[in-house]
Amino acid sequence: MTIPFGPLALDPVLPPLLLAAVTVPLAAFATAIAARRRGSARIRWVLRLGMVLLVTAAALRPVVPGDASGPTATGGLEVYLAVDTTSSMAAEDAPPSPGPASEPPRTRLDQAKDDVAAIVAALPSAQFSLTTFDSTAVQRVPLTADAGALLAQTEAITQEVTVYSSGSSIDEPLESLAALLGDAREEHPDRRRVLFYLGDGEQTRDRPPASFGELAPYLSGGGVLGYGTEEGGRMRVYQGLADRPLGSGGQDDDAGPPTYILDPAGTGPALSRIDRTALAALSEQLGVPFRERVATDAGDLTDGIEVGDVDLRPGSITGPVELYALFAAPLGLLALREAIAAGLLVAGARPARRDRRARA
């Protein structure tokens, strides 16, 4: 708990009332004893009172306020990315990347990662938030202007662990996104917000998906990006830590060939297909375009979206300055004096005890 204190601020190590309950009785005791002593004895107790006051001052932790966040440059645009990581996004029916063919083929999730990178590159100085969803929705990256951090986290995304898959629903991130967008508008009502939903539209849970219409009032643009083909693709099995991470060109050479999720009859690999109808309905609810990602070119994903004026904030490179050391240094000297005095007192008492034993 930081307490303003003139040009300074206090950040006590204990709640102020608890700190007072400990130090006030000690200060009162030392004051009372010092008032009854004379000469050098009084000086010793005055110094002990000083130790109590120094401990109190250091425990209050006075600081010179400051902000070490450094300079930032952000536009008036917030970009929210929701990426499907269900098992169907591991289907191998993504368009091949330019250059030599990869083996095994690229997955839908590989293509979605490339599209995230393209969106980030096309909207410099925007702020980005990344949410992934499978059986649950998780915000992987809170809203940030650090594009490098977002891209690193995006590259680390994997599909859900296959054995834990409990079916997919395209509305899984709805509640999480509604909370994020609502909080963001309340905090910064002047900013514009766009949402990109990246998924294949596959709904395998036994219920219809909820409408995304409640998100539309928060948004000024975005897009629904659909992945997969009508013919479908085989879905890779992912075992978590037992597997190597999937890269843009598939698994590492040493990882061996991928295995695939079987169909219900167990006779061969199951196929996942894009659900264009579900994705088109989602885009209509959000009021944003639906783009089926049938090619690797991502140049049109952000058409019509402008970052806006860039807000430059210089910040500070100094940060808060702690002042407790000003009290800790003299406290240490007084504590050393007390330790030396106690040692001399003990050393002087030993010869006296030996003399009394000898006389006895």
Image (cartoon, rainbow, N blue to C red):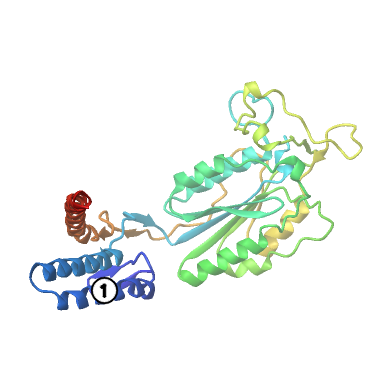
Taking the spot 62% from the left edge, 61% from the top edge, the residue there is 176
Q: In this view, does 132 lie above or below 232?
A: below
Q: Could you tell me which residue is drawn at 17 percent across and 69 percent down?
A: 45
- Compared across the picture, whether 181 is left or right of 213 comes to left
Mark 1 highlights which residue?
5
Q: In which quarter of the image is residue 239?
A: top right
The front one of 313 and 358 is 358
Q: Which residue lies furthest to the left in this view?
A: 39
Q: In this view, does 139 lie to the left or right of 280?
A: left
How dense is the environment of label 1, judged by Cα within 10 Å: few (below 14), some, or many (20 and up)? Answer: few
Residue at the image point whose x is 65% and y is 35% from the top: 241
Q: In this view, does 104 lie to the left or right of 153?
A: right
Q: Disc 1 marks which amino acid?
A: Phe
Q: Disc 1 on helix, strand or loop?
A: strand
Residue 349 position in % (x across, y down): 19, 54
Q: In which quarter of the image is the N terminus?
A: bottom left
Report the side of 173 relative to 80 (left or right). Answer: right
Measured as percent of width and height from the top left, residue 134 is found at 70, 50
| Vertical relation: 237 (above or below) 1 | above
User: Residue visible at 63% across and 31% down?
Assistant: 244
The residue lying toward the viewer, choosing from 167 and 6, is: 6
Q: Compared to 297, does 103 lie above or below? A: above
- Nearest the viewer among 91 and 231 is 91
Q: How many numbered discs sit on the rendered protein? A: 1
Q: From this viewpoint, is residue 146 visible?
A: yes
What is the quadrant of residue 177 in the picture?
A: bottom right
Residue 64 visible here: no
Picture coordinates of residue 146, whole percent (x, y): 43, 49
> Percent position (x, y) of residue 235?
76, 37
